[in-house]
Image: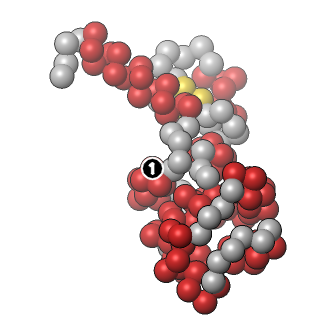
Amino acid sequence: AILDRDKYDKYKDSENIFFTKLMDFEEDIYDSFEFKDYMIFIKNFNPKVLSCFIGGLKKINVDFNPQNFENDLDDIVITKQQSNQLKEMYKKTVLQYLSSNKNAVTGRELAKYVTEIPLSYRDAIEKIKGMVKDNGIN
């Protein structure tokens, strides 16, 4: 199982329990995105929300055409520094959005676009792979 970090004290001695690096799933998943990948997730999952990022992109001088923002999103170049600035700028809003849209469908979609699999999930996957191999299951 993978549990939020705030459950650590209660379950720390339980077998096969993994904990998020940060306080909860939403923080871990957001931390695992480059901001452009997060915008691509939004474009494909809830495009009505995408335009809220235009102001932040302008604020940090990302070169793009606001009139054709959604269609040109794949071509927009965002440096690592700009990505980090955007993540910090939108962190509270995005975490609220993710918390209020917490369900299996959203989780499945986030998994399609996440830049890097969060450590707790990688650890759980490796554990399962080892258990499968140890039991001779293909």
**Going 24% across and 11% down the picture, which residue do you hit?**
135
User: Helix or strand or loop: what does disc 1 sit on?
Assistant: helix
Observer-nearest of 133 and 53 = 53
Q: Residue furthest top?
A: 134
Q: Which residue is mark 1?
A: 111
Q: Which of these two is toward me, 77 or 22?
A: 77
Instruction: Please provide percent x and percent y for residue 56.
Output: 76, 72
Say whether residue 122 is visible: yes
Look at the image and tell me whether residue 3 can be seen: no
Q: Does residue 42 appear left or right of residue 135 in this picture?
A: right
Query: x, y (%) of residue 132?
Result: 28, 18
Question: Is residue 50 positioned above or below 3 on the image?
Answer: below
Residue at figure coordinates x 58%, y 81% from the top left: 69
Q: Residues within 10 Å of mark 1 (few under 14, many from 20)?
A: some
**Colour scheme of the picture:** secondary structure
**x 33%, y 16%: residue:** 131
In the rendered structure, the answer to whether residue 70 lies left or right of residue 93 reads: left
Quarter of the image where the C terminus is located: top left
In the visual, does 97 lie left or right of 105? right
Q: Position of residue 95 (x, y in %)?
A: 68, 57
Q: Amino acid at mark 1?
A: Ala
Q: Residue furthest bottom?
A: 67
**Residue placed most toward the observer, 10 or 89:** 89
Kindly identify the residue that appears in the image at 60 percent across and 45 percent down: 32
Q: Quadrant of residue 100?
A: bottom right
**Where is residue 109 shown, x and y percent of the image?**
43, 57
